[in-house]
Image (cartoon, rainbow, N blue to C red):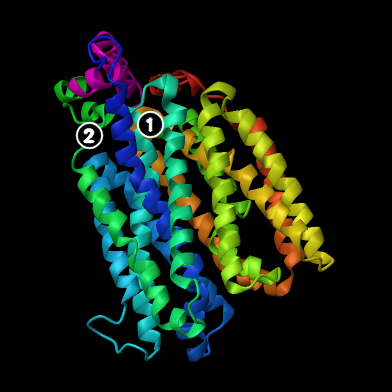
């Protein structure tokens, strides 16, 4: 171990891996619905003669919880700490996994659809969504506050890799459950196994969170500098620890009234717009409705699940690319390149949809679109949200940005079925327009943060 002089690389790696399991659950929980949404429509929505909007709202109901989780993450992470907030998220994931699989427990009869049963299912999904909202805010914040500046982008990007890997894992799980099974079995039993499978990583996350330390930035805020120094020594080595602690204390003192300053409002606006654009480009439509999209292209049920796995593999490959290059190439160039790729892809899909051209070309542009997103906005949005904000306001500012992101996510995902019923070309054209505007936003408003410490953010935003 290189603890005395250069810090303990193994230690920071282990901490990061434990924290990123929250990201894996984030991805797992948000994507598990992709394999079950047709079954939910068949066994809960259609028997009650409910509308396409209700179906869309059910598919997206977890996002209500994500908004709630995002909103309360600032208060929880500031009062309980980053670590205890992550443990709370683990408990919520576990409850949601079991409750979503068997929503009839205690109050309803299995096999008898009712509005009450649909409501119970949505409540459990919202509980899981609160866990996702907490994890989505606090996992990158935790890693950002733990990581040394030189590798912070890479380590925070690992959280995005975990999110995408969680999605890929659940795509395999859903495919394995549905493979060679009848539609009737999937609609009655299979979808339950899909949701219940999340209980395993949720329990593991709760155990691992108990083993990681609180972040030195939070410990300093609550006046536990001696414990903060011990953590900093393990991460950065003896020589740097005291210097970093002094910088943290100085930055905290300088940002007491940041939220009311012009520059405090500016950084909040940039964080919120990053979050909104990351959703308005339509990525979660591709993730949540992937099997249905591929089925609309003529794929059979099993084949559509398999094509979803292919998409998941593409996501993983390009997320690895951004992890490798984010601290070398910088945040802004990758974001703008990703926006360009998404713009071309979505306008191409809109054109193909307008002329009713369905086939391999559509699949190619969907894969190009998701690759462009994962190599840029997918990871870097979270990197920037974790590092843009000054220490004193980070918890509250991240909460605002994440709540805005999940609100935008809900609006886009819940309106997708109704928009597609109106016009596929218009729907994908809208996402293409948002991708083009996202490039303009990055060019004009987003600063480059490559290589800067979290304490440098005060200078970047002219605070203190």
The quadrant holding residue 321 is top right
Determine which quarter of the picture holds residue 74: top left
Could you tell me what secondary structure mostly forms the magenta stretch? helix
What range is drawn magenta here? Answer: 230-258
Position above or below: 236 against 66:
above
The relative height of residue 146 versus residue 295 in the rendered view (above or below) is above
Q: Is residue 70 visible?
A: no
Q: Residues within 10 Å of mark 2 (few under 14, many from 20)?
A: some
Asked if residue 458 is positioned above or below residue 103 in the image, the reply reads: above
Name the residue tied to disc 1: 144
**Residue 100 visible (yes or no):** yes
Q: Which secondary structure, mark 1?
A: helix
Badge 1 local density, few (<14 within 10 Å), some, or many (20+)? many
Judged from the image, the secondary structure of the residue bearing numbered disc 2 is loop
- Residue 266 in picture, x, y percent from top left: 52, 33
Q: Residue at x 39, y 28 (%)?
A: 390
Q: Is residue 335 magenta?
A: no
On screen, residue 192 versus residue 91, left or right, reads: right
Q: Which residue matches tag 2?
A: 214
- Residue 357 rendering spot, x and y as whole percentages: 81, 65
Task: Assign the C terminus to one quadrant of the image.
Answer: top left
Cβ–Cβ below 8 Å for labels 1 and 2?
A: no
Q: Earlier in the sequence, mark 1 or mark 2?
A: 1
Alpha carbon distance from label 1 to label 2: 12 Å
Along the viewing direction, whichever of 214 and 315 lies nearer the viewer:
315
């Amino acid at each position: 171990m290189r603890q005395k002089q250069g810090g303990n690389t193994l230690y920071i790696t282990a901490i990061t891996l434990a924290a990123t399991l929250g990201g894996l659950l984030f991805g797992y929980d948000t994507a598990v619905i992709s394999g079950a949404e047709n079954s939910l429509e068949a066994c809960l929505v259609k028997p009650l003669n409910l509308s396409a909007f209700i179906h869309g709202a059910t598919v997206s109901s977890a996002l209500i919880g994500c908004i709630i989780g995002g909103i309360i993450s600032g208060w929880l992470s500031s009062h309980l700490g980053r670590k205890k907030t992550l443990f709370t998220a683990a408990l919520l994931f576990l409850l949601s996994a079991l409750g979503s699989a068997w929503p009839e427990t205690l109050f309803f009869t299995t096999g008898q659809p009712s509005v009450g049963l649909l409501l119970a299912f949505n409540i459990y999904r919202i509980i899981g969504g609160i866990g996702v909202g907490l994890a989505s805010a606090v996992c990158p914040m935790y890693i950002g506050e733990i990581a040394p500046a030189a590798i912070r982008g890479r380590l925070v990007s690992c959280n995005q890799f975990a999110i995408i890997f969680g999605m890929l894992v659940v795509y395999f799980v859903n495919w394995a459950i549905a493979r060679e099974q009848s539609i009737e079995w999937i609609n009655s039993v299979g979808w339950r196994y899909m949701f219940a499978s999340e209980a395993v990583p949720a329990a593991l996350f709760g155990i691992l969170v108990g083993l990681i330390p609180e972040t030195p930035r939070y410990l300093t805020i609550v006046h536990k500098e001696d414990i903060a120094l011990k953590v900093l020594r393990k991460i950065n080595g003896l020589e740097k620890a005291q210097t970093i602690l002094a910088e943290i204390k100085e930055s905290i003192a300088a940002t007491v009234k940041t939220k009311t300053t012009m520059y405090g409002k500016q950084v909040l606006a940039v964080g919120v717009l990053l979050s909104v654009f990351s959703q308005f480009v339509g990525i979660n439509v591709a993730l949540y409705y992937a099997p249905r999209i591929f089925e609309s292209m003529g794929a059979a049920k099993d084949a559509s699940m398999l094509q979803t796995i292919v998409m998941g593999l593409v996501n993983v490959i390009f997320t690895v690319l951004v992890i490798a290059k984010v601290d070398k190439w910088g945040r802004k160039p990758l974001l703008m390149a990703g926006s360009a790729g998404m713009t071309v892809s979505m306008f191409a899909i809109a054109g193909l949809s307008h002329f009713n051209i369905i086939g391999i070309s559509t699949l190619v542009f969907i894969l190009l679109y998701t690759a462009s997103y994962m190599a840029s906005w997918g990871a870097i949005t979270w990197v920037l949200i974790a590092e843009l904000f000054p220490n004193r306001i980070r918890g509250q500012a991240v909460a605002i940005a994440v709540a805005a992101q999940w609100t935008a996510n809900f609006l886009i995902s819940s309106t997708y079925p109704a928009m597609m019923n109106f016009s596929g070309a218009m729907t994908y054209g809208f996402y293409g327009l948002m991708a083009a505007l996202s490039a303009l936003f990055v060019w004009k408003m987003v600063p480059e943060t490559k290589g800067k410490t979290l304490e440098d953010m005060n200078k970047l935003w002219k605070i203190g």
